[in-house]
Amino acid sequence: MKFLDQAKIYVKAGDGGNGLASFRREKFVEFGGPNGGDGGSGGSVILKAVNGLNTLIDFRYAQHFKATNGEKGGSTNKTGHGGNDLYLRVPLGTQVYAEDKKTLIYDFTKENEEFVLAKGGSGGAGNTKFKSSTNRAPRKFTKGKEGEEICVWLELKIIADVGLIGFPNAGKSSFLSISTRARPKIANYPFTTLNPNLGVLQIDDKEIVLADIPGLIEGAHKGVGLGDQFLKHIERCKSLLHIIDINEEDLITNYKIIREELRQYSEQLLKKREIVVFNKIDLLEEKEKNEKLKKFKTFFKKKFFEISILNKQNINSVLRAL
């Protein structure tokens, strides 16, 4: 399934049906009173958040949506049928913005949550409604009101327990593939991951959702590389798993660059819990590895992990920490 995290759509609710002006016509009843019914209400356009969707790809090829109109009123005081509501399914984590892309209209954070994006027009009144003691045979009726119409942007921010961050080619996709059933594209070159990937981790009777965020580079918050289009997905993650290639020349600088990109995008990202992991320890001699990690430990006072995804070394320790 292709990934799409932004889409512009136009929706139009159904118009209300017109009321009817009619009169009772029966044998031996010379002056039958008014019996025109009311028009039915138009259908509304409703967004509904569902689990199991993680892309807005359905809105790439269909951007215009319209609910059905209400039917006009009938004789013998029959109310017209109301229009059917139109439900549009969106992934959990979808935000609805006005056409200016700045004004937040709604934010879906719960499964099966619903939001009426465009309300259907009310039906018009039939002439029966206008009968009075002074006007026994009104011919007046009203037309149904038009349904609301609106143009909005849908923006998806993936909801996950843990977001995998780090430079391109640090091993994030590989980690996701060995710890979950997700099968992201993996190759030995930067920017293999072009879209966020989700996987469910199960260990010790516990279950959490991991999100593999495409690699960040210096200047990502300004749109450099794959840019800030994926930094927004980190906002929804409860915790972060920061994977660093231990073969990088300066581990401290490597770590600081990613943290600075998070800070530049949003100070809130720095408040998330973080686990730091050094990958590819199988490619270094023990002495060189220890020297690098000792230097990093003087800067980073918290606990960190050293793993080899290739050899599946220390993986379960990280999974339990997560």
Image (tube, rainbow, N blue to C red):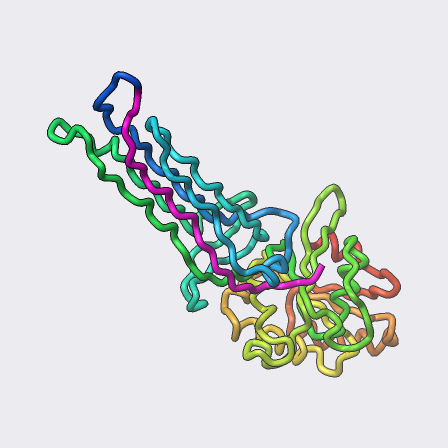
Is residue 19 one of those drawn in magenta? yes
Seen from this angle, which residue lies furthest top? 28
Q: Where is residue 62 in the image (x, y as percent from the top left)?
A: 58, 59
Residue 43 image position (x, y, % from top left): 44, 44
Which segment is the magenta one? 1-26
Q: Which residue is drawn at 30% across and 20% down?
A: 26
Name the outermost residue toward the bottom: 249
Does residue 250 show up?
yes
Q: Where is residue 299 in the image (x, y as percent from the top left)?
A: 64, 75
Instruction: Examine the rendered structure and indicate whether residue 242 appears above or below residue 84.
Output: below
Question: For residue 33, what is the image quadrant?
Answer: top left
Residue at (59% x, 53% y) in the render: 91
| Quarter of the image with the C terminus in it | bottom right
Query: Residue drawn at (24%, 24%), measured in percent from left and top?
Result: 32
20 relative to 84 in the view: left or right = left
216 or 37: nearer the eye?
37
Name the residue rendered at 60%, 81% in the picture.
224
Q: Where is residue 127 in the image (x, y as percent from the top left)?
A: 25, 34
- Above or below 182: residue 279: below
In this view, the residue farthest toward the left is 134
